[in-house]
């Protein structure tokens, strides 16, 4: 008799449900019938792009590609261009990036009183649990990131590709693994102790302090869950890849930094090390990118004030970024 999906191991009055195994599949069923693994990568360019060079002049499938979309024409049938989208009641300008994946209302991040909500990638990560070594990657070329926890705290973004490559693909020695496991266990012990101390304070607090304390407990629970997953993965070998560890490009070389993050994200998805990634393509550095014909920083050029010379330099920068997206392995 073929065992059912809900097969149990029974001993001494205890029942433990087995996970889904290929051996439990009905005869004739194959792995191809399983639901495909879904992946999501969210990119944000907080300085935007020059609209006339990006958006097509006409709508519909037969639109003539804009200068920027021309370099992506190979993938024309695989993407959709949308305009006119917005998050209502979200501050305009640079502060809008904080709500890019949350949609949280605010009139300006720096004015205080703003509490963000969970970002789209972190919400998806909650449902995936420990299915991958890393629940999600928060990557950034410079500055802040796009990911926010359920308690509205920014997930610190990774700024250095070499460190992320090591985290995903370089196996340490047995001693390194043991040391990592001890650090995780120690971290859990510290969290348990701090949580107990905080709970002892709870009875004497007012409503506002209770709310803040609950936010703290939420953050602690999120950390504990991540540590449990990290401990389970600590002793599993990391996937082997042919790629060499990447260098950390200079901050001013936005094109190289973008290309490195795109390629590294592709490797992470390809090896199922994660299924979720956010990448902030920030060009806020005041340095001049190494692009022929460009003599000013990307941030300064984005505030061009309709100066034709600045717009031309901005076109050169943004065109190189679009080429990077089209030629990267992430495509």
Image: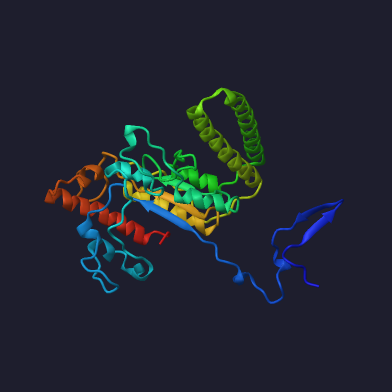
Task: Identify the residue at image location x=44%, y=39%.
Answer: 154
- In this rendering, position of residue 88 left or right of residue 197: left
Q: Is residue 14 above or below residue 3?
A: above
Q: Is residue 58 above or below residue 316?
A: below
Number of numbered discs on residues: 0
Q: Is residue 243 visible?
A: no
Of 19 and 151, the residue lying toward us: 151
Residue found at the very far bottom of the displayed protein: 28
Q: Residue 32: which quarter of the image? A: bottom right
Q: Is residue 318 visible?
A: yes
Of 133 and 106, the residue lying toward us: 106
Of 283 and 251, the residue lying toward us: 283
Q: Is residue 175 above or below residue 57?
A: above
Q: Residue 252: which quarter of the image? A: top left
Q: Position of residue 105 (x, y in %)?
A: 36, 44
Q: Position of residue 199 (x, y in %)?
A: 61, 28
Q: Residue 144: which quarter of the image? A: top left
- In this rendering, position of residue 296 left or right of residue 259: left
Task: Identify the residue at image location x=64%, y=40%.
Answer: 177
Task: Identify the residue at image location x=46%, y=38%.
Answer: 153
């Amino acid at each position: 008799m073929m065992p059912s999906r809900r097969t149990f191991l029974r001993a001494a009055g205890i029942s433990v449900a087995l996970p889904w195994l290929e051996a439990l599949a009905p005869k004739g069923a194959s792995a191809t019938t399983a639901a495909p693994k879904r992946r999501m990568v969210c990119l944000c360019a907080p300085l935007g792009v020059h609209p006339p060079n990006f958006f097509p002049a006409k709508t519909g499938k037969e639109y003539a590609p804009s200068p920027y979309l021309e370099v992506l024409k190979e993938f024309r049938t695989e993407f959709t261009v949308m305009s006119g989208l917005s998050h209502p009641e979200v501050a305009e300008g640079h502060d809008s990036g904080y709500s890019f994946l949350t949609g949280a209302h605010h009139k300006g991040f720096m004015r205080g009183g703003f509490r963000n909500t969970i970002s789209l990638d972190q919400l998806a990560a909650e449902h995936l649990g420990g299915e991958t070594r890393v629940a999600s990657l928060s990557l950034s070329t410079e500055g802040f990131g796009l990911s926010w926890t359920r308690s509205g705290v920014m997930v610190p973004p990774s700024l250095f590709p070499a460190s992320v490559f090591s985290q995903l693909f370089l196996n340490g020695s047995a001693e390194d693994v043991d040391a990592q496991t001890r650090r995780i266990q120690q971290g859990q012990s510290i969290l348990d102790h701090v949580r107990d101390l905080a709970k002892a304070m709870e009875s004497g607090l007012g409503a506002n302090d209770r709310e803040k304390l609950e936010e703290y407990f939420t953050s602690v629970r999120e950390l504990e869950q991540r540590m449990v997953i990290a401990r389970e993965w600590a002793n599993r070998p990391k996937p082997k890849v042919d790629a060499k560890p990447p260098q950390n490009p200079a901050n001013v070389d936005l094109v190289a930094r973008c290309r490195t993050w795109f390629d590294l994200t592709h490797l992470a998805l390809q090896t199922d090390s994660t299924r979720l990634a956010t990448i902030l393509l920030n060009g806020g550095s005041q340095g001049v990118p190494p692009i022929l014909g460009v003599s000013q920083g990307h941030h300064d050029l984005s505030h061009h004030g309709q100066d034709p010379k600045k717009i031309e330099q901005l076109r050169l920068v943004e065109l190189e970024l679009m080429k990077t997206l089209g030629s990267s392995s992430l495509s």
